[in-house]
Image: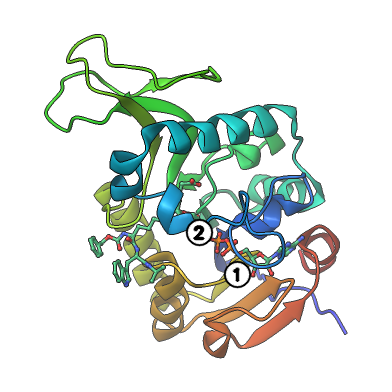
């Protein structure tokens, strides 16, 4: 049985999405059936150590994904959230771990991209003054920085790297505000295996939120949710929102 989310006129809603919401757009998830890329673990392809070991392999991974994301379209799940943002305005905070930009393409205007964006490129040398730039290029070999001659890298957040502190503050403030009004936390298509995103449900719960999960399979942090729907985001989101 599927119930609508309890969204009154003063309710705040925080939504956290993960790879599963884009699966129905043809973008592979990281974990679970199929794995993301030739069965190689995310830690090997999405870490500074992995990049240092084999930047060519890491760029092939990201360029294949760039090409795939360019071909992909937002699905019913992305669209349902975009429509809800129009209705709820600033009472809805949409945060995503995805780097594919599909929430923006579905019409969501304010999206906190916790792990960056696949169409950003920056220098791998932290001391270089070259800024991150929007970049849709699919490179045949590792691109090099024109300023310092070090390899360029995708502008995403890898394991062991810190998330943008302004984004984290924005989420902390929104959750803190949840104590003053009815508050719902909704996670969609995420395994709950990667911190700090996987911890957000626990902070929201501590602030009094009703916590809801929509995920195809059992998530690692499922115990923190009051209501769980196992199924496809594209089927369930339009029904509960
Ligand atoms: C559907 C569906 C459908 C399918 N409908 N559902 C020990 C050692 C070292 C570090 C750590 C450690 N312990 C903890 C850490 C910290 C680490 C971490 O959490 N590691 C764990 C693996 C243990 N985290 C970090 O390092 C983070 N930074 C940090 O904590 O800074 C402080 C710090 C610094 C230094 C040391 C320690 C701490 C940064 C994490 C960055 C993660 N980056 C990636 C790559 C981003 C770029 C890219 O896209 O390439 O982010 S990894 C990858 O996982 C990606 C994802 O955003 C993220 C989460 O994955 P997600 O979205 O949950 O996807 P899946 O595939 O796991 O799940 C999909 C789900 O959807 C499945 O459950 C399906 O069932 C479901 N699904 N189809 C609905 N149609």
Q: Return the residue at label 2.
A: 41
Which disc is residue 26 wearing? none
Task: Indicate which disc, 1 or 2, sits on the residue closer to the N terminus.
Answer: 2
Asked whether 123 or 141 is in front, the reply is 141
Q: x and y percent of residue 123 in the render?
A: 27, 25
* Relative vertical location of residue 174 with respect to residue 26 in this rendering, above or below: below
Query: Farthest left residue?
Result: 127
Q: CA distance from mark 1 to mark 2?
A: 27 Å
* Relative vertical location of residue 171 with respect to residue 86 in this rendering, above or below: below
Q: Secondary structure at mark 1?
A: strand
Q: Nearer the viewer, mark 1 or mark 2?
A: 2
One can see residue 114 in this view: no
Asked whether 143 or 112 is in front, the reply is 143
Query: Farthest top residue?
Result: 146
Q: x and y percent of residue 241 in the render?
A: 76, 63
One can see residue 33 in this view: yes
Q: Residue at x 19, y 11 (%)?
A: 147
Q: Residue at x 58, y 84 (%)?
A: 222
Q: x and y percent of residue 182 in the render?
A: 53, 76
Contact, mark 1 vs mark 2 (Cβ under 8 Å): no
* Relative vertical location of residue 179 with respect to residue 53 in this rendering, above or below: below
Q: Residue at x 67, y 85 (%)?
A: 227
Q: x and y percent of residue 80 in the render?
A: 76, 52
Q: Secondary structure at mark 2?
A: loop
With 43 as the anchor, is 233 left or right in this view?
A: right
Q: Return the residue at label 1.
A: 186
With 91 as the anchor, is 55 left or right in this view?
A: left
The picture quadrant where one finds residue 206 is bottom left
The picture quadrant where one finds residue 67 is top right
Count of labels shown?
2
Asked whether 56 or 135 is in front, the reply is 56
């Amino acid at each position: 049985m599927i119930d609508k989310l309890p969204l009154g006129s003063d309710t705040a809603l925080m939504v956290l999405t993960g790879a599963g919401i884009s699966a129905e757009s043809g973008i592979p998830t990281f974990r679970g059936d199929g794995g993301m890329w030739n069965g190689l673990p995310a830690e090997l392809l999405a870490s500074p150590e992995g990049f240092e070991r084999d930047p060519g392999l890491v760029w092939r991974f990201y360029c294949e994904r760039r090409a795939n994301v360019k071909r992909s379209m937002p699905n019913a799940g992305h669209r349902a959230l975009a429509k809800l943002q129009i209705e709820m305005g600033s009472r809805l905070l949409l945060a995503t771990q995805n780097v594919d930009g599909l929430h923006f393409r579905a019409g969501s205007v304010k999206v906190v991209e916790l792990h960056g964006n696949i169409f950003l490129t920056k220098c791998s040398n932290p001391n270089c003054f070259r800024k991150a730039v929007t970049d849709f290029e699919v490179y045949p070999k590792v691109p090099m920085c024109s300023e310092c001659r070090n390899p360029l890298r995708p502008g995403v957040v890898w394991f062991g790297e810190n998330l943008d502190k302004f984004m984290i503050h924005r989420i902390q403030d929104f959750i803190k505000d949840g104590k003053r009004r009815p508050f719902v936390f909704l996670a969609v298509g995420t395994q709950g295996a990667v911190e700090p995103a996987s911890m957000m449900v626990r902070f929201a719960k501590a602030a009094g939120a009703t916590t809801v999960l929509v995920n195809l399979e059992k998530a690692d942090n499922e115990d923190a949710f009051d209501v769980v729907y196992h199924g496809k985001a594209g089927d369930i989101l339009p029904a509960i929102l």
